[in-house]
Amino acid sequence: MNRDSAINVGQDIGIVVLSILIAIILGESGVLSQLLASTKDIAFLGSFIAGLFFTSIFTTAPAVVALGGIAQNHSIVLNALFGAVGAVLGDLVIFRFVKGRFSDHLTEILATQGGRHRLRALLHRRTFRWITFLLGGLIIASPLPDELGISLLGFSKMKISGFIILSFLGNFLGILLVGVAARAL
């Protein structure tokens, strides 16, 4: 790994650490819960804001609670629609950071340990791209952290327009399921 790559990896790690610290502070201080509670009377603004926080491992739990609470008293479909729009914006922030950079750094690290030809062949196979595309989409739709799914999508070299559609559909489905579960309880 050359010096510039090492600096880029260090910057990437620094950004991830900073975002984790901010998310932990928001969650632990109660600011996130207060923000979501303040939008109680404007349900679909609350859905949108909760959707923004639905994407990160550190803010998913309060977002799920907020989305479930909104779904109990309002339209499940509209809750999922507005929540998914917010989630797409949250995912786009992560995707813009991860797409290319993370997969390029990981590819470079793996290639330096030998097997450069095999690794390059694997990454260019359609099967590999489809598997990372499907796994990434499933992870985005699940309560698992979107960061993991988005990292996988970075390997599939997906265009931003395709990512937006996949993110919207996955998050819509995930939030819709949260609403259905909340109503069932």
Image (spheres, rainbow, N blue to C red):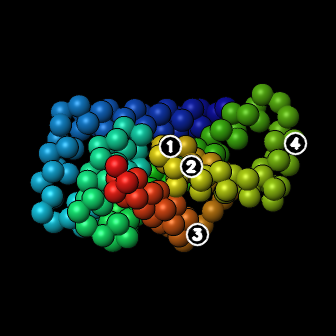
Residue tagged 1: 144
Q: Earlier in the sequence, mark 4 or mark 3?
A: 4
Residue 26: give x, y in percent of width and height.
24, 38
Q: Residues within 10 Å of mark 1 (few under 14, many from 20)?
A: some
Earlier along the polypeptide chain: callout 3 or callout 1?
Answer: 1
Earlier in the chain: of badge 1 and badge 2, it is 2
Are circles 4 and 2 on residues that touch, CB within 8 Å? Answer: no
Spatial distance from mark 4 to mark 1, Cα to Cα?
A: 33 Å
Q: How far, Cα to Cα, is label 2 from label 3?
A: 16 Å
Q: CA distance from mark 1 to mark 2?
A: 6 Å
Instruction: Assign a secondary structure to mark 1.
Output: loop
Tag 2 or tag 4, which sits nearer the N-term?
4
- For mark 4, what is the residue? 117
At 50% from the left and 43% from the top, the residue drawn is: 144
Q: Indicate the amino acid at tag 2.
A: Ile
First of labels 4, 1 by sequence position: 4
Q: Earlier in the sequence, mark 2 or mark 3?
A: 2
Mark 2: which secondary structure? helix
Mark 4 lies on a secondary structure that is helix
Residue 32 relative to residue 144: left or right: left
Q: Which of pointers 4 and 1 indicates the residue nearer the eye?
A: 1
What label does residue 139 carry, if any? Answer: 2
Q: Is residue 48 above or below residue 142?
A: below
Q: Are marks 4 and 1 in contact (CB under 8 Å)?
A: no
Question: Which callout, 2 or 3, points to the residue nearer the camera?
Answer: 2
Identified at 27% across, 59% down, the residue is: 72
Query: Relative to the observer, which residue lies in front, 88 or 40?
Result: 40
Residue 74, image x and y in percent? 25, 67
| Residue density around tag 3, few if under 14, some if 14–19, many if 20 or more, within 10 Å | few
